[in-house]
Amino acid sequence: MHSPCSTLPSHSRLPALLVLALGGLAAAAPGGPVEAGGAKTLLGRVVPVDSEPFEARLVGADAKWQWTFAAGAARRRLGADALVRWGKPAEPVRGPVVVLADGGLLPAEPLRIDAGRAVLQSDSLGRLRVPLESLSGVILHWPTDHAERDRLTDRLLRAKGSRDSILLANGDRLAGVVTNVNDRTVQLERDGRRTVLARNLLSAVVFNPALSSEASKSSLRTWVGLADGTLLLVDRLWLDGALLRLVPGLAGRSSPPWSTEADRCVFLQPLGGRVVYLSDRPADDYRHVPFLELPWPYRNDRNVLGRRLRASGRTHLKGLGVHSRSRLTYLLGEPFDRFEAALALDDATEGGGSVRCHVLVDGRRQFSSEPIRGGQRPVPVRVDLTGTKRLELVVDFGERADQLDYANWLDARLVRGKKETAKPPEPDAKAAKP
């Protein structure tokens, strides 16, 4: 699919962005979200779909995807389909970390394997019994280096084969059937023999990839981040007094909701509704012209090195990782109001690199950035898409040829108009409040 680019556009001045008044703050109507009884959730940045961001606390949420945020004495109620995100995700600081099949992370101690389920002990969520098919594996010793964390996490998520395996700290790998994991040892059956290995010799346990279950296909879901680095994709959540109740998609609706203190919640990012992330759909064309000979593929929800997207010390779950000189093309296929993103060089550049970015709509340039340098705060982008059919994202060389040009289109998204928004689903009776 790689082919030489046509002439890439030169840069121009960054157009002024429309400044929208915050407005709309009012007390929640009767029958709205239940407010957290006395819980103090952390202050975080609320990014609505249709207005300017503001700092607020999450103080209410009901099972119909209606969330209430407090900004001082004022209250603002938003449906999940009207929110881009709130807060920022934390990262685990120590292991073990359970890697869920949908990409979620759960810092938890594996206690045992029992009847096709892993029994886990989480500081935030208590004791959990999770089906093995919901798990990619367990990283027993969580690396301190971000790059190594990401490499090991993705190795578990992308594992192939039809057997469990154990990754040893020295780089070796043993395949078989994991029969138990506890706080000291891991048991593996292979060729009719049982092998017991001390956990301090191991790096990770990988569960049979062939048994991995599909993630929930609910039309509206949300990523939930907790202060200890827990990251869960859930089908339902609500505040019940000072507790946050969660129904993870992979846990199954027949399982009881998971619960944690509301003040542990630091991040929400809905999927579905009016926001469509470009990383969730394939590009219709990608062209990259190397400065010399090294090709760089683009990546979804990762930077060009294959690591998580990080900029200004913050991790982003959604976005595109690209390298200069490149062009991504998307055929829209349906009406959208606008394209939005934030542009930054990834923290992996350690302050190096320089690029210029452009957005073309139906072949006409609608946005061009000034040079974007490593260590610079993300630059917001907003482009009108009314009546258009083709969107092109271009990354051009900056001031230093192609050195460290690890460009991120953070939260790159298409925004549907309100008329095209599907009505949020009614809560499943089994998933409603207990």
Image: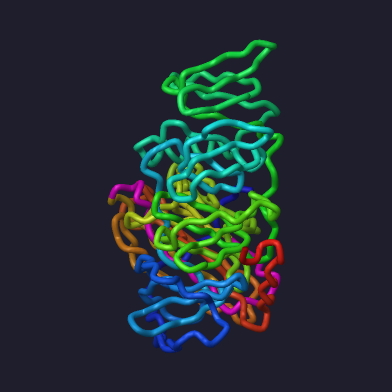
Q: Position of residue 113 (x, y in %)?
A: 61, 31
Q: Residue at x 61, y 34 (%)?
A: 159
- Asked if one can make out residue 294 in the rendered structure from this viewpoint, the answer is no
Q: Which residues are magenta?
A: 329-350
The C terminus lies in quadrant: bottom right
Residue 137 lies, in percent from the top left, at 56, 35
Residue 282 occupies quadrant:
bottom right
Viewer-side residue, 60 vs 243 = 243
Judging depth in this view, the residue of 210 and 416 nearest the camera is: 210
Q: Please, which colouring scheme is shown?
A: rainbow
Q: Is residue 278 above or below residue 17?
A: above
Q: Give the image location of residue 270, x and y in percent.
A: 55, 65
- Left/right placement of residue 34 relative to residue 354 reads right
**Residue at 38% in and 85% down:** 74
Q: Quadrant of residue 21?
A: bottom left
User: What's the residue at 65%, 58% (across, down)?
Assistant: 284
Can see residue 95? yes
* Total marks in image: 0
Q: Quadrant of residue 12?
A: bottom left
Question: On screen, 218 above or below 211?
Answer: below
Taking 88 as reference, is 300 above or below it? above
* Residue 370 part of the magenta-drawn span: no
Instruction: Name the side, left or right, on which 254 lies relative to 172.
Output: right
Residue 399, position in %: x, y?
31, 56
- Residue at image location 47% in from the left, 44% down from the top: 122
Q: Is residue 335 magenta?
A: yes
